Image: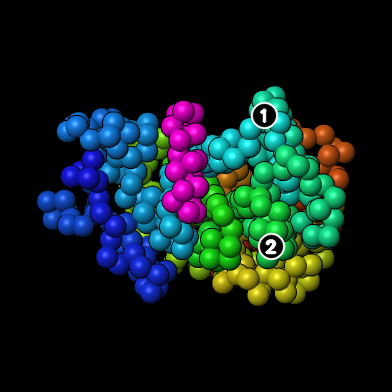
Amino acid sequence: MTDKSPTPSPSSHTADSLETRCVHAGEPRPRPSGALVAPIYQSSTYEYHGEDYHDVGYLRLSNTPSQLSVARKIAALEGAEAALVAASGMSAISATLMAFASAGDHILAQDCLYGGTQGFLRGELHRFGVSHSPIDPQRPESWEALLKPTTRVIYVETLTNPLVQVADLEAVVAFAREHDLVSVIDNTFASPVNFRPAEHGFDLVMESCTKYMNGHSDLIAGSVAGSAEQVHKVKLTLDHLGGALDPHACFLLQRGLKTLAVRVRAQNGSALALARLLESHSAVARVNYPGLASHPEHERAAALFAGFGGMVSFEMVGGTAAAETLLKAVTLPTVAVSLGGPETLLVRPAAAIHSQFSAEERTASGIADGLIRMSVGLEGTDDLLADLTQALEAV
């Protein structure tokens, strides 16, 4: 397959800025037929010349030119040795956890996770004999008591959904090394612009590329980055699960990644301005944003992150009724799930992304009925501030 696969870009080394890596890392060299943009290789299979069968290009095996090119770009952005793209963020999460935990094994998982991840841990993995224990990400001293001889993985998120909490990430890495665990982190909310977990010692970094990595609300994709050995192990599981990313989605993702740095930095700035507005308004009971000094983990976030992200959540004083009034009053944001695109999105988690959990479970996780999650887009900051102000006044 070496005659058809793109070679690593000369500009993918870590001395380059993140902006330069976004544009040039992983691109085919030499450029196919001189094309400035990597082509879409819309082929499911490739010629066989007697090499090892598993090295022959086949779309389900994630080893075709389109898949390899975008994976190399992601590895360069994450500061990792290797990367793998998958058909969705959940495909990447599922393949990773199944690659490192078998029947009878045990996982330590952050106590407040994305709903899809929680469902996979409680449902599919539980059915296949893999147990898990929730850990308080702010109390590393409590983790050892939850360890079992069969514990294999510790799993956290850089920023949690929807409360935007910041785990003690340095303690996670140290704990994993001390107890020979695979440290896995979902970095979706931060993206490699704001935080690169592999450079801080995490074994495997996952992104829902549906979100900031692509950034245009027009595809579903996921990625896993880490050492070549561990990523290959995930790949073998993904091969069997069939969660390969198709060539056109690879093309869209590669295009989106070229503007990742400028997009996310713009969203960082707008989110901080909006969070400050919300914190100052009497209709808002609480704002969750790590860029605010009032955030419990602000100092940790300031020390670790290059930016505080584009995700803000806030709780309305008037509960559900006030939240629903505000959602109807805004004119620029759209009420929709997902995040990380150019459009500002609002959603009430209790009615959407966490609706499958009981009221008691949501309360225990700090997800109030009047909580709104906001994914800040790329509209003008002043425009967003003006629209949110008028919506708050309508409550």
Q: Residue 40 location, x and y as percent? A: 25, 42
Question: Does the rendering let one see residue 249?
Answer: yes
Question: Is residue 323 visible from the viewing direction of this image?
Answer: no
Quadrant of the snapshot with the C terminus: bottom right
Disc 2 residue crowd, few under 14, some 14–19, many 20+, Cα 10 Å: some
Residue 80 on image: x %, y %: 46, 59
Are the residues at dot 1 and dot 2 in contact (C-beta closer than 8 Å)? no
Range drawn in magenta: 222-243
* Towards the viewer: 364 or 332: 364
The residue beneath circle 2 is 174
Q: Quadrant of residue 133?
A: top right
Q: Quadrant of the N terminus?
A: top left
Q: Is 231 one of the magenta-colored residues?
A: yes
Q: Which residue is mark 1?
A: 103
**Which amino acid type is marked by label 2?**
Ala
- Vertical relation: 122 (above or below) 200: above
Quarter residue 102 falls in: top right
The secondary structure making up most of the magenta span is helix
Residue at image point 67% right, 25% down: 128
* Viewer-closest of 225 and 207: 225
Residue 343: horizontal and vertical position, in percent? 51, 53
